[in-house]
Image (cartoon, rainbow, N blue to C red):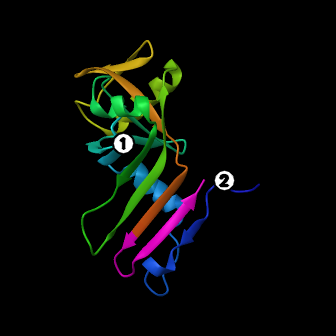
């Protein structure tokens, strides 16, 4: 049976001599364990917008929520292309990840419930939600859930060696 894990391609010009590509399994673990992510979207007038958020990584995709009146929801309604990043601010250690993809609204109750359950397992209040209709509801009111499945991702490892890995999906 063939593995569905994408192969990492090392960018040697941005990596230490002797560095090897980071396996996608390691990147996936970091995506699952991260607590804070940064979402980059594009405003209708073309200006960038970046905001911190919480998310869960399951079934190979990142899931996040946002209120329907928030800037990120407005941006995604006109342009679903986005980038989600996470990592560490230390130069001597860590793995920074950049995930490119399109945000797709999740509306079916069974998938929304899986996302709500994943949030409950990972985060405390105020990130507790209930499913109602095609949205989730929490302390801040109604929120739309989005799924971003990677189309391309980059990993930047630091520590004893620096590595720059690209994965294509």
Mark 2 neighbour class, 10 Å CA radius: few under 14, some 14 to 19, many 20 or more = few
Residue 163 falls inside the magenta stretch: yes
Report the front residue among 7 and 151.
Answer: 151
Residue extending furthest toward the bottom: 17
Range of magenta residues: 157-169
* Magenta stretch, overall SS: strand
Please tell me how many numbered marks the rendered image carries: 2
On screen, residue 168 above or below 21: above
Residue shown at the point (36%, 36%) measured from the top left: 121
Residue shown at the point (48%, 26%) measured from the top left: 106
Q: CA distance from mark 2 to mark 1?
A: 28 Å
In the visual, does 94 lie left or right of 28? left
Q: Which residue is mark 1?
A: 41
Closer to the eye: label 2 or 1 = 1
Report the front residue among 123 and 159.
Answer: 159
Q: Return the x and y of residue 159 as percentages of the image width and height.
A: 34, 77
Q: Return the x and y of residue 140 as percentages of the image width and height.
A: 23, 22
Q: Is residue 24 visible?
A: yes
Mark 1 neighbour class, 10 Å CA radius: few under 14, some 14 to 19, many 20 or more = many
Residue shown at the point (47%, 80%) measured from the top left: 13
Circle on res. 4: 2
In the visual, does 90 lie left or right of 166? left
Circle 2 SS class: loop
Q: Where does the N terminus fall, quadrant-wise?
A: bottom right
Report the front residue among 145 and 125.
Answer: 145
In the rendered structure, are the residues bearing label 2 and label 1 in contact, judged by CB atoms less than 8 Å apart?
Answer: no
Q: Quadrant of residue 14?
A: bottom left
Q: Return the x and y of residue 120 as percentages of the image width and height.
A: 34, 32
Q: Quadrant of residue 124?
A: top left
Report the front residue among 164 and 113.
Answer: 164
């Amino acid at each position: 049976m063939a593995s569905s894990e994408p192969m990492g391609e090392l960018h040697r010009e941005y990596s230490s001599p002797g560095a090897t590509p980071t396996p996608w399994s390691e990147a996936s673990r970091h995506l699952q364990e991260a607590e804070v992510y940064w979402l980059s979207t594009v405003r209708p007038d073309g200006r960038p917008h970046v905001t911190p958020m919480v998310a869960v990584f399951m079934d190979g995709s990142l899931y996040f929520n946002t209120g329907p009146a928030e800037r990120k929801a407005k941006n995604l309604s006109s342009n679903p292309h986005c980038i989600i990043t996470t990592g560490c601010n230390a130069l001597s250690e860590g793995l920074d990840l950049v995930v490119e993809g399109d945000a797709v609204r999740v509306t079916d109750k069974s998938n929304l419930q899986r996302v709500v359950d994943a949030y409950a397992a990972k985060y405390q209040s105020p990130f507790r939600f209930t499913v109602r209709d095609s949205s989730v509801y929490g302390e801040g009111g109604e929120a739309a859930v989005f799924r971003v499945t990677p189309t391309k991702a980059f990993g930047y490892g630091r520590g004893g060696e620096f590595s720059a890995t690209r994965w294509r999906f």
